[in-house]
Image (tube, grey):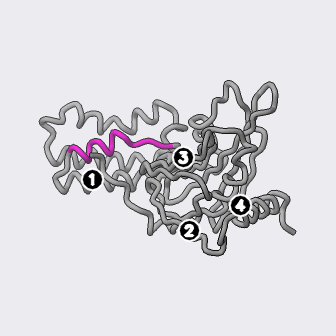
Amino acid sequence: MPRPCDAAVGLALAAFLGSLPGCSEVQPRALEVGRHRLQLVVPAGWEHLDHGREHLFRRGDNELSLADLGVATQEGVQRELRNAESLWRSGRTADAFARVSELRGALLEIAPQEQVTAFFRPWDAVLYDSDTADTATIAAAFAALMDGTATFAELSAESLIEPVVARCVDMARREIARREGRSIHGADWIEIETWDRVSHLSRSRLACTESGGNLLVLSMERGPLESSVAEFEALLASIEIAPAEAAAPEPAPE
């Protein structure tokens, strides 16, 4: 028997598509959101802005964000390190160093600071002597980072919520009213609804999933829930993420 939430999503999606002229002709749009390759249906009448790691969908005062929030697993960290080392070995040293320096994500944000400091220590030594560091020293630093990745504990789906909420929600003013796990086109999502701590009004939503080692988050950035809930639900229900092996390589830093 379908859950109430599933029924509500189905009704919202049906209402959204049914309101479109020639709705049977609506086709998913292929996008690359950071490391994620996916397809979705852009809400009718909404502007779509592609910023690489973040895509924005706007209509009037309402705005939805679909963003890659960085590495969430050991696999994700190791992939970024392999990409950085490949850049270095191809002669793009500045790009390689930038890739390591910009390594961010839930796996590192949740870990104790002393663990993160210890993880980056071999690389910090290279940066300190970057003008004189030879090939063997840099290669050893990359190897140490790869080995150090194993020291981070893999995160549960519930643990991944912490950095998402910390980055996307002002928890000084808001609190979580509801959280729920959902499966959408084979991907396991967690959807969160928040509201004002005092009034229990001003509701908002976000949903996140891990794919290919990185976090993907859909969130309401601006505008009241009531004026964009159908589009949020329809957009979320339309997202189909490509398998990890087909994930798009993130562009190197300029």
For the residues marked 3 and 1, what is the alpha-carbon distance in whole angstroms?
A: 23 Å
Screen quadrant of the N terminus:
bottom right
On the image, numbered disc 2 is attached to which residue? 28
Report the front residue among 248 and 226.
226
Name which of mark 3 and mark 1 comes first in the sequence. Answer: 1
Label 4 CA crowd tier, 10 Å (few <14, some 14–19, many 20+): some
Q: Which residues are magenta?
A: 94-105
On the image, numbered disc 3 is attached to which residue? 153
Q: Which mark is residue 16?
A: 4
Label 3 CA crowd tier, 10 Å (few <14, some 14–19, many 20+): few
- Residue 246 placement (x, y as % from top left): 44, 68
199 lies left or right of 234: right
- Residue 39 placement (x, y as % from top left): 53, 65
Q: Is residue 172 magenta?
A: no
Decide whether the magenta segment is chiefly helix, strand or loop: helix
Closest to the camera, between mark 4 and mark 3, is 4
Closest to the camera, between mark 4 and mark 2, is 4
Q: Name the residue furthest bottom.
A: 24
Do the numbered discs 4 and 2 sit on residues whose CB atoms are within 8 Å? Answer: no
* Up/down of 197 relative to 226, above or below: above
Amino acid, disc 3: Ala
For the residues marked 4 and 2, what is the alpha-carbon distance in whole angstroms?
A: 14 Å
Do the numbered discs 4 and 3 sit on residues whose CB atoms are within 8 Å? Answer: no
For the residues marked 4 and 3, what is the alpha-carbon distance in whole angstroms?
A: 41 Å
222 lies left or right of 75: right
Give the residue displayed 65% in from the left and 60% down from the top: 188
- Residue 226 placement (x, y as % from top left): 75, 44
Amino acid, disc 1: Glu
Do the numbered discs 3 and 1 sit on residues whose CB atoms are within 8 Å? Answer: no
Closest to the camera, between mark 3 and mark 1, is 1
Secondary structure of the residue carrying tag 3 is loop
